[in-house]
């Protein structure tokens, strides 16, 4: 049996869960998330404990068991505390700013790049070179952060570009000239 799938999920105070068939709706102080799960897994709510059960023991059902439990846990965590990804701009003249709700990034192109965040995502600019992407949906936060990073990925020679705050750029030695 899946060790991750067996773990019960404790619903914190201030968070409401509603199960309608295989559709789970979780709402809390940070927002509201809804997800429909496959028929191989079932959701069971007893007081403030949510369990994910599987119907059988096939390979597909075992793999969906742990996945579904993790998705439910991320939904509960997201509406309770939220998720954050931080990015840094490294390079001379590289900067970003927030205009209305759009993120405007200037990273050495002939034009500024504008990124409009989807519903439920908040972008915070700290200084000119730090960007924080916040939201309740972990997958959406990661997608938006990856989209911002893809504007100018860090290069290995000078390290210029947009990188995650935890990311370490492996540097390469440049060309060595003729002696």
Image (cartoon, rainbow, N blue to C red):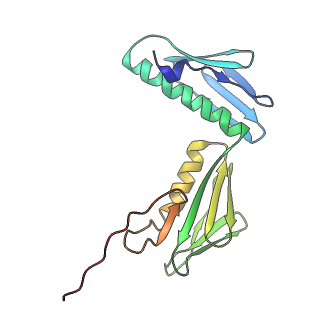
Q: Position of residue 119 (x, y in %)?
A: 67, 50
| Picture layout, residue 145 above or below residue 172 | above
Quick check: 159 left or right of 15? left
Q: How many marks?
A: 0
Q: Residue at x 66, y 19 (%)?
A: 50
Identity of the residue drawn at 62% across and 66% down? 130
Quadrant where the N terminus lies? top left
Which residue is at 51% across, 76% downward?
Answer: 91
- The answer to whether residue 124 is left or right of residue 2 is right
Image location of residue 6, percent across then percent down = 54, 18
In the displayed image of the protein, which residue is found farthest to the right? 14
**Going by the image, does 101 lie left or right of 22?**
right
Query: How far across and how far down the image is residue 95, in percent?
Result: 59, 75
> Which picture quadrant has residue 102?
bottom right
| The residue positioned farthest toward the left in the image shown | 179
Q: Residue at x 46, y 24 (%)?
A: 64
């Amino acid at each position: 049996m899946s060790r991750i799938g067996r773990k019960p999920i404790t619903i914190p105070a201030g968070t409401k869960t509603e199960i309608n068939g295989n559709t789970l709706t979780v709402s809390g102080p940070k927002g509201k998330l809804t997800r429909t799960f496959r028929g191989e897994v079932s959701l069971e709510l007893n007081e403030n404990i949510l369990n994910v059960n599987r119907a059988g023991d096939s390979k597909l059902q075992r793999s969906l068991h742990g996945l579904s439990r993790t998705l439910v846990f991320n939904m509960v965590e997201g509406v309770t505390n939220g998720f954050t990804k931080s990015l840094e701009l490294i390079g001379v003249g590289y900067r970003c700013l927030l205009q209305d709700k759009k993120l405007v990034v200037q990273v050495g192109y002939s034009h500024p790049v504008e990124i409009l965040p989807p519903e439920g995502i908040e972008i915070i600019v700290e200084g000119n070179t730090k960007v924080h992407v916040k939201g309740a949906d972990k997958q959406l936060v990661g997608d938006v952060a990856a989209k911002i990073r893809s504007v100018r990925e860090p290069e290995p020679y000078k390290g210029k570009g947009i990188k995650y705050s935890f990311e370490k750029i492996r540097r390469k030695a440049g060309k060595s000239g003729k002696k």
